[in-house]
Amino acid sequence: MGGFGINFTTRSPSRNHPSAHFLRGDSSICPVSTATSTLPPKREITTKPRFSDKVFRAVVTTGGFSSLVILGLISLFLLYNGLNVFRTEGLGFITGFDWIVPLPEEGLPAQYGIGAMLYGTVVIGLIALFFAFPISVGAALFLSYYAPDWLKKPMVLVIDVMAAIPSIVFGLWGFFVLMPHAEYWAKLIHKYLGFIPIFDMPANAFTRSPFIAGLVLAIMIIPIITSISREIFAQTPLDRIQAAYALGATKWSMIKSVVFPYGRGGVVGGAMLGLGRAIGETVAVYTVLNIVFDIRIEVLLSAGGSVASMIVNKFGEANPDELKALMASGFVLFLVTLLINFLANFIINRTARE
Amino acid sequence: MSTATIPRPSKPWGVNFKQAIPDVVAAFATLLITYAIVAYTPLKGKLAFVIVLFLVAVIASAAISGIRRDRKAALNSISTVMIYVAGMFVIFPLGSILYEIIRRGIGGLSLGMFSTDMAVTASDAPLSEGGLIHAVVGTFYIVIIASLISVPIGILTALYLTEIKGKAAGTIRFFVQAMSGIPSIVAGLFIYAVWMIALGNQYSAAAGAMALAILMIPTVARTSEEVLKLIPSDLREAGLAMGGTQWRTVAMIVIPAAQSGLITAVILGVARVAGETAPLLLTMGGADALNLNPFAGNSSAIPFYVWKNFLLGTETAIDRAWSGVLVLMIIVLFFFSLTRFLSGRKGRF
Amino acid sequence: MSTIQGANQMSQANPVHSLANVAAAHSASKGDHHIAGTGIEAKNIHAWFGDKHVIDDVSIDFFPGTVTALIGPSGCGKSTFIRILNRMHEFIPTAAMAGEVLLEGKDIYQSGTDVTKIRLGIGMVFQKPNPFPSMTIKENVLSGLKLAQLKVSNQSELLESCLVRAGLWNEVKDRLNEYGGALSGGQQQRLCIARSLAVSPQVLLMDEPCSALDPGSTLRIEETIRELSASMTIIIVTHNMQQAARVSDRTGFFLSDGGPGRLIECSSTSEIFSNPKDKRTEDYVTGRFG
């Protein structure tokens, strides 16, 4: 027995044992690599995939490409159907304000112009953003930096539920609950601040105006912008925040100097996504708006429209010709929404990479 | 053994009673001033109280901080008040919406609602007549058919992006993101143009379902992709290293591991489209009678039912609309809670 | 006293000497074995990731019934090398290779080969234990059969034998229907070994199988490796030189000097640790670097 308890005996493999020669350190079995001056060419690696795998890949690829195909088809059909209208009206389709569908016996050419509706769409969207953006950012800041822990989870739940509410619920609520309140306040403002020219308006001003539509949409898009802003704020690097505090910043100056510069892009992207959603909204706008083809500066007056609500309005009684014009309008709306969404995602992704 | 006693833990940075006194006094003063303003000026009502309170609070806290410390502190106080208000404000609309829905809709709820349709009911008939079974059946049909279309396409798209990662993956991801921004009315317009005008079909639940599928596919695809990306790649490697083909590795290992997430993706998609109205207006026709054939003939769905009653405008019609909204909200909240419940469970661990 | 305990005592005295003794003791304890299966031979293997040359001309013949350890500092291409042996290297989009890998005399990279069949014959155990989360212990062990659609006449017999060979049977025989996630790290890794055994591979590749485990589990897995080597060829990548000395018959030393990884020396384990031919090998095994 070896002095350290190791059994050094006896059982060495017999010389004739097949494994013997390499247990003896015969290194001819594994030649050591020598540096080669010329490298061999890379091999082309081929596999013969099993039939089942070929089927699998084909099926999955088809499914994946379907999305491409569907989107392409949508663009194509709307464009195709609206092409006539684009050809006759040209750019006037987008800038013209008149939508005249003459009776067949009159024999006059129809005129289609969605300029007023586009203007309305943009105005309503901007009003919505005007109200939603500060509130959403404020709420996101509240959740990220001010709210006590026990309040955070329920509040986030509330916001997520709000995001899930269907738009027709907002339409109904906007018409039956928000509008009467707004009317009350319009009366009040008119009564006590009426001497200021801007507020000098008839009492029924608020009813069914782009302003109300904007308000309803604002409430609809607050959850989206708040969620995105919250996520952006959560990514603010902690060491920068603590550096600001260490320099004697108050909470607000910390937010101004660290959180906003860092999260600016992402929050703007979130706002644009909210805007994109607002622009495409149909029923919530339709319930609270009279469709009038005119551009008015006074957004508080009951007149205006958006492209989406116009489509719903005219769709029921449209003759085939007018239908094509509606398709063209849909195409324009589609393009605008696409553009805004891409811009928004681009901005969010670019700032996320920093 | 040490004889020194350990001091008691304390939080010197916490709110000290003495320091808090001026703040409490200030808060009281704010309330008093607000109450005074509301009582003695023409501004009346709950909303007035809230707005005046907000203004007074901003001014008061800014003044106090400004006097006590400096301008920076005043700004901080103003912003704090405003941010608190923003936070509270966000909760308010949901409360109002839920309250109003329940208040206005519960009156019209009855068991009879679920057994009749509106085929023979006049627009101003009392609530005891007529029901929304045609709408419920319609919603049921369109959700099922839309899921049958969009779930395979959505999950296959996600599988393409995570398992096959072909050259088109970037393009497809780009397009899926584009699809998720389609306005719902444009989706309806497309189905109208293709299915009904070009191919000459009539209004049907299936047409509505197809429009909804366009909206559902991006949600299902994106959420599924996120879920599949979370499955660690060495599970796939282990399966392939044992001699499994790619499809068996995916089918027997990856998908079961992701199953609760995939189900969540599907339910999220359903929750998104269950309440959509605009595309249905263009594709379903809005029947009043129960239509059990999802592939032909005018059909209705719950949002459409609400819409029609809203347009009718009579008092009972409006009541019906609210009841319809109540039913719709119950369905949406059910799916929403289901999603939460499923994503809370950590798979089969 | 077991050889391991003795070796540990020795290692406090003199590192190289003790490793050499361990290696000697290991080869001494290897008696007559049945040599099963075939070996695998790597010939002039080169590997690239894009333009980066990561393995330079490595050739090793792994004989059946042996355990070969591949040692060397991190980043020398050891893990890449074993992934070339079972055609897992090609999953990385920028990967390329040159050379041949002969299994039963045939090059596995020949065009037209059925890759999934190759992988059936070459098993792999990964660094981090990865039992399939959606399957029970029983289903995990038999998952290879399902994946490769192999028919076996007596599944429970196979289940038991795999778990016995992996050294896990006694601990799980009463809970075969529980989920794999409930086991400890060492048990999970043994489950993964049992899983690889179920498809009867000729060769078993192990990529640092014990690096995520505690010393107790590590030793049990090393016992398992020694027992398994009777019936298959085992190649184990390890950072732990003591482990290489304990467990392997042959050892290959990889090194990269900033360029591609090369095989510096490869011979019997006792030689490498007691009488290395290359100075770099000696520096590494005596702990002067790495």
Image (tube, coloured by chain):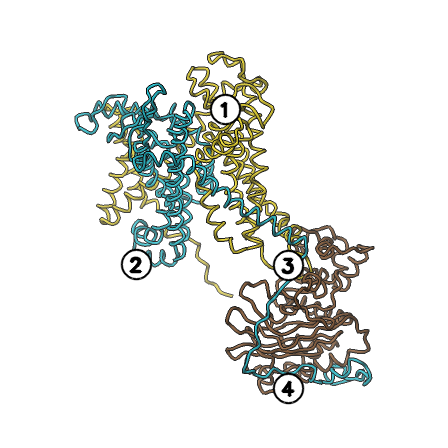
Residue that label 2 marks: A247
Comparing B46 with C127, the one in front is C127
Q: Estimate the x, y position of residue C153 in percent, counting from the top left.
A: 83, 55
Q: Are the residues under marks 1 and 2 on the same chain?
A: no
Q: Estimate the x, y position of residue C260 in percent, counting from the top left.
A: 54, 76
Kind of residue at badge 3:
Asn
**Mark 4 Cα-neighbour bin, 10 Å: few <14, some 14–19, many ≥20:** some
**Closer mark to the observer between disc 1 and disc 2:** 1
Kind of residue at badge 4:
Pro
**Closer mark to the observer between disc 4 and disc 2:** 4
Name the chain letter of the residue that bears numbered label 4.
Answer: C
The CA span between labels 4 and 3 is 36 Å
Above/below status of A38 relative to B236: below
Q: Estimate the x, y position of residue C273 in percent, counting from the top left.
A: 65, 83
Secondary-structure class at tag 1: loop
**Closer mark to the observer between disc 1 and disc 4:** 1
Residue that label 1 marks: B285
Secondary-structure class at tag 3: loop
Q: Which chain is cyan?
A: A
Residue that label 4 marks: C276
- Residue A282, picture quadrant: top left
